[in-house]
Image (cartoon, rainbow, N blue to C red):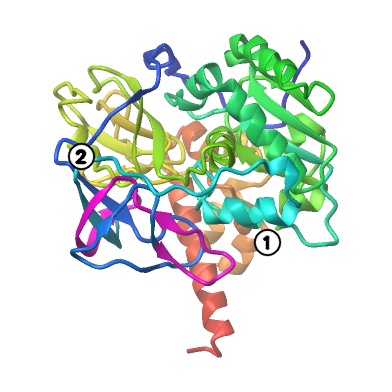
Amino acid sequence: MKTHTFKGGIHPSEMKELAKDSELRSAFPSTNLVWIPVTQGGAPNTPIVKAGDVVKRGQVIACSDAFMSAPVHASISGTVKKIENRTVTGNLDAPCICIESDNQNTEEFMSVLDPFSLSPEEVVKRIKEAGIVGMGGAAFPTHVKLSPPKDKEIDCVLANAAECEPYLTVDYRTMLEMPEKLVDGLAICVHAVNAKAGIIVIEDNKIDVVPVLQDAIEKANLSEKIGITVCKTKYPQGGEKTLVKAALNREIPAGKLPADCGCVIDNVGTLVAISDAFRLGKPLIDRSFTASGLACENPCNLTVPVGTLVGDLIPEVIQLKEGVSKIISGGPMMGFAMVNANFPVQKNTSGILFLTEKEAPIAEEDPCINCGRCTKACPSILSPVLMNKALIANDIEEAKFYGLMDCIECGSCAWICPAHIKLTQRFRIGKNIVRAEMAKNKNGGK
């Protein structure tokens, strides 16, 4: 089978062998408590429950009237104990709804629907009601993605099955264990945007999944509608721009979205959640993720209620070795280093990594030697070295000229840099400065 790729990128150690053979298994917090962030993608939500309320699993507990919002549902049945700020991914304090389980697992799901008997608008409505967001990390509301402007004709939906970040294997396990749900979710999205086809895009380090997916496609009688494209294993293959380039040989224009070149992209977990939203009436209330790293005694793939504190899975479910140097929410390239494990699993939590000092060494920055390796590695065809120099000189306009706002923060440049310059971190700070200035100008300089 022919493989496809993109220009640039890097080849970090995959480390997927640690957890790839671990089947998905369900786990529950030892405290019987979940702390569900009120907002998990899109516009801010407002709680619609209060302390003392009894809730059912699947019941809406926070929402907003904004189109860009995604409602949040109770992931367990029980009693709301409190609503207060708690540290979440990114080390930010955010309001969370604490629910104590009643051990009854009482459910309040939506009605079961046949997506293909519904109009595209009705399909998108159900996806919003289910609170589905991008589960690859970005948590962008899926119903918004499936509502492109009228002048944007979508001819293809891509299932992002690359899972290019090291260590992470949850998408791989999902494809092996639930291929029919992935195929069904992709077909639903194709219907929702009136596309001609759907393509599952996978890296060749997961080639063993291809016959499993092909069998699911054939059983669903979707061989003429859904195909599989295999890409070379290279980071960041799963980025939107790189995925579109490798799979379709199309370029997403600077500052634009996949819809601007005729496609929509959804993650494996997102597509499975979409299938469940129709076939089971189930909102997005459970999250599967990979727990791994050399400081993890038992690397595994788990499914837990959204809002489960990672610390409440230790040591009953996740056992750790001595010498945990860093805890990361997400993957090692684009994830967030956390202060401790007392943060909740969210809808977009793809992995929790427990790394040793050897895996996550702390290196001092040296002066840039102008080697150009960062430019060669950049999948967005930018010049990180020139962006970095502009930011050091506090020249934001020059940094923007060299493509600061087109940086996808994949970390390839920082990983390849022999001087250990924290390029990605600097670009994030620079982009935040630009956004703050834009917000200030929008508000009349206030």
In reply to whether residue 88 is colored magenta, the answer given is yes
Query: How far is mark 1 from mark 2, CA to CA?
Result: 57 Å
Q: Position of residue 76 (x, y in %)?
A: 29, 45
Q: Position of residue 37 (x, y in %)?
A: 33, 56
Residue 371 drawn above or below residue 220: below
- Residue 423, which numbered label? none
Task: Tell me, yes or no, if residue 190 can be seen here.
Answer: yes
Nearer to the camera, 330 or 71: 71
Nearer to the camera, 254 or 288: 288
The residue sitting at 55% across, 21% down in the picture is: 175
Q: Nearer the viewer, mark 1 or mark 2?
A: 2
Q: Which residues are magenta?
A: 62-91
The residue sitting at 32% across, 31% down in the picture is: 353
Q: Position of residue 359 (x, y in %)?
A: 32, 25
Q: Which residue is mark 1?
A: 401
Q: Amino acid at mark 1?
A: Phe
Q: Residues within 10 Å of mark 2 (few under 14, many from 20)?
A: few
Q: Position of residue 317 (x, y in %)?
A: 22, 25
Q: Residues within 10 Å of mark 1 (few under 14, many from 20)?
A: few
Q: Secondary structure at mark 1?
A: helix
In reply to whether residue 287 is colored magenta, the answer given is no
Residue 424 drawn above or below residue 356: below
Q: Secondary structure at mark 2?
A: loop
Quadrant housing residue 3: top right
The residue sitting at 32% across, 23% down in the picture is: 293
Please indicate whether residue 223 sits to the left or right of residue 414 in the image. right
Q: Amino acid at mark 2?
A: Asn
Please indicate whether residue 299 sits to the left or right of residue 218 in the image. left
Nearer to the camera, 172 or 249: 172
Please indicate whether residue 307 sits to the left or right of residue 267 in the image. left
Q: Which residue is mark 2?
A: 103
Nearer to the camera, 30 or 219: 219
